[in-house]
Image (spheres, rainbow, N blue to C red):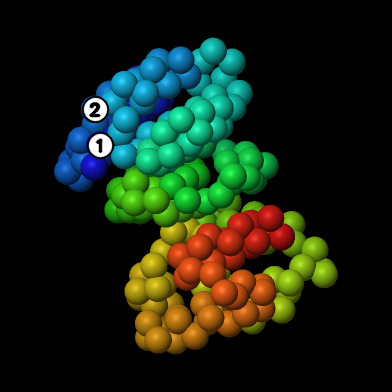
Amino acid sequence: MRVVVGEDSLIVRKGVVRLLEDAGLEVVAQAGDLEDLLRKVRAHKPDVAVTDIRMPPTHSDEGLQAARVIRAELPGTGVLILSQYIEEDYALALLADGADGVGYLLKDRVTEEDRFIDAVRSVGAGHSALDPEIVSGMIGRKQRDDPLAELTARESEVLGLMAEGRTNRAISEQLFVTERAVERHVTGIFQKLGLTGTENDHRRVLAVLAYLKG
């Protein structure tokens, strides 16, 4: 898997690059600002662009700007955004055009090597990878008339793990239940959210979006 890394802090960038390379991923380019990141992504067409949410020139939302451009021009390239803080509005903006091939992690997760690498691989494979703390923050924004309120506690837990990009097998291992039990919960989630008659992978994305926007 080929990766471009966008990060203006040299120390952080080198740390991210080393983790990726130690995991067997190929870092094809590095960038320290928005313009350089977009130039190198366009040139190399990587599987994933890993970028800080705030970079020069304005240190505001360059990561989101990059994600919009990359998804529009190179739909085959996933984007994983790293942020120092929990910024739920940024996460929702990132997901506005769909959750396929996008991820949003807190920078603290970079120290959790396995989780970080799993997120990069998931995004590169066209799936989503959302930080559990971001997901938890979204829960508090639900309204009482939200259809998500009909979910059981276990279904909400399963949906939260789906939002992190976990497969049914990974969810079963996390919750110490059988994969068949997870499948039943996922089916129940789809039914309660009215997601019927579409492909299973597509319904997972729609369910996650409903969860985050609730």
How far is mark 1 from mark 2, CA to CA? 6 Å
Q: Is residue 181 above or below residue 158?
A: below
Q: Secondary structure at mark 1?
A: strand
Residue 153 horizontal/vertical position (percent): 62, 79
Residue 182's quadrant in the figure?
Answer: bottom left
Residue 107 horizontal/vertical position (percent): 45, 39
Residue 15 horizontal/vertical position (percent): 29, 32
Q: Nearer the viewer, residue 125 or 18?
A: 125
Residue 8's quadrant in the figure?
Answer: top left
Determine whether, in the image, residue 59 is placed left or right of residue 29: right
Residue at x 47%, y 58% (from the top left corner):
164
The residue labelled by disc 2 is 28
Determine whether label 1 and label 2 are within 8 Å by CB: yes
The residue labelled by disc 1 is 2
Q: Is residue 196 visible?
A: yes
Task: Name which residue type carries label 2.
Answer: Val
Q: Nearer the viewer, residue 78 or 108?
A: 78
Q: Is residue 99 above or below residue 178?
A: above
Q: Which mark is residue 45?
A: none
Task: Name which residue type carries label 1.
Answer: Arg
Q: Is residue 152 above or below residue 34?
A: below
Q: Secondary structure at mark 2?
A: strand
Q: Residue furthest front?
A: 197
Q: Is residue 50 visible?
A: no
Residue 62 horizontal/vertical position (percent): 54, 24
Crowd around label 1: few <14 · some 14–19 · many ≥20 (10 Å): some
Determine whether, in the image, residue 150 is placed left or right of residue 18: right
Q: Is residue 44 above or below residue 209?
A: above
**N-term mark: 1 or 2:** 1
